[in-house]
Amino acid sequence: MNFNKLYIALLFGATVMASSCSDDDSDNLPSVDAPDAYVFTRNGSSSVSYDGQTTRIAMTQELGTAIKDETKTKEELLAMFAHEAGDADFTDTDLNASDKNIRSKVAASADLFASNTTDATAIKSQLDTWIEKQEEEVFPRWNEEASAGEAGQLVDGGSARYVSADGLEYNQLLAKSLIGALFADQVINNYLSTAVLDAGTNQEDNDADVVEEGENYTSMEHKWDEAYGYVYGAAEGKSYLLSYIDQVAENENYATIATDIEQAFILGRAAIVAKNYTVRDAQAEIIREKVSQVIAIRGVHYLQAGKSLLAAKDFGGAFHDLSEGLGFVYSLQFTRKPNTTEAYFTKAEVDGFFDDILANEHGLWNASATTLDEVSQEIVDALGLTLAEAAE
């Protein structure tokens, strides 16, 4: 680990200690020894485990491929989304045998949805609807050219984009919405929540190094690992969320964001091993802030890129970018304001952005540049970002 980053992270933790504890209490907090990488052992064996997250990432990757296959039925696609153990929904037999699925973890965090089943149900239904519309609207016109009010395909450089009558690329809407609804929500609003980390006797058990039955980790260690797994747990390639963390880090204005997130994960896990929950919670707060920024930055980036391509009448490229942008906009309702249990934008506010952008006849075909600018500005203002920097 870079020493300066570790020092900054520990300093941030120390700042939290100073605000929440007396001098005597701070003196009694255990020191944290963070490793260079996310490697933790107990009795000579790894204590890190996130198999469930690896499985859900693989399921999402297969669904992302299948929704671009015009021979699939909506029943087949929905079965992949809400898989049941033993059903042959995937090409991977291990995924078919799994009792896990994607849909059950959508909008399912402890902090945002445990007492808000109305929004959780509506969000799951919205994703179902986009999957269904891919078969009902787009697949029948797979080999037809799209036009305003007619679904079909459009050229985007060397690629073909398959869009609805309103120019929506449902596969992109689904993929980018899952970055918030599944991945970010499970990381920042569920597994890093004190409601989950400290549930039941977790803190008492962690203090006494009581491991889960038949496992090599305490329950608290495992919850933190599960958050880590949703970002870094892909068996092949990168998870959807990690891919966009890295893309934002390629923007020179946010060059440290990927390192900041990874080091916070490492230091937070080390703090759990050290029984220092003040440093743990400080790292969770860093991850919430940075992951929320990733969603907002990519949303604004794609809205602005799509606006420019629309002005140039490059409809294939514009609709691809705008569909990605709308997916990230949808994910804003799963972000997190610092030191609160609130998202930066409510479901109603996100729905309002969709209504505004798609308000004109034939939706994205006639999307207003002024509206795209207004939505982009509202997003960056809420997170304290700069429009020009986020748009790069």
Image (cartoon, rainbow, N blue to C red):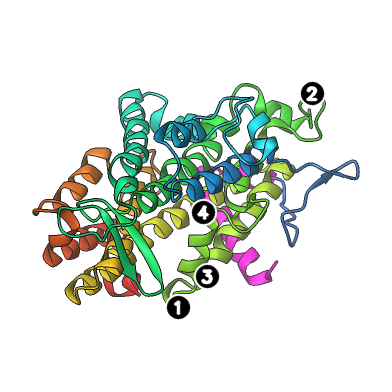
Is residue 344 among what the camera can see? no
Foreground residue among 387 and 3: 387
Q: Look at the image and give the residue range highlighted in magenta.
A: 1-29
Nearer the observer, disc 2 or disc 4? 4
Foreground residue among 148 and 55: 148
- Indicate the secondary structure of the residue bearing disc 4: helix
Q: Which residue lies under the disc numbered 4? A: 240
Task: From the top left corner, tell me how far across and down residue 73 is, in percent.
Answer: 42, 36
> Which residue is the extreme one toward the right?
44
Residue 10 shown in magenta: yes
Q: Which mark is residue 256?
A: 3
Give the mark nearer the N terminus: 2 vs 4: 2
Residue for point 80% across, 31% down: 215
Left or right of 283, for residue 342: left
Q: Residues within 10 Å of mark 4 (few under 14, many from 20)?
A: many
- For marks 3 and 2, give the CA distance: 39 Å
Foreground residue among 190 and 17: 190
Give the mark nearer the N terminus: 4 vs 1: 4
Q: Which residue lies under the disc numbered 1? A: 252
Q: Which residue lies under the disc numbered 2? A: 213
Is the residue under label 3 in contact with that under label 1 (CB below 8 Å)? no
Task: From the top left corner, tell me how far across and down residue 50 is, in percent.
Answer: 68, 41
What amino acid is labelled 4 in the image? Tyr
- For marks 2 and 4, give the CA distance: 32 Å
- For marks 4 and 1, give the CA distance: 21 Å
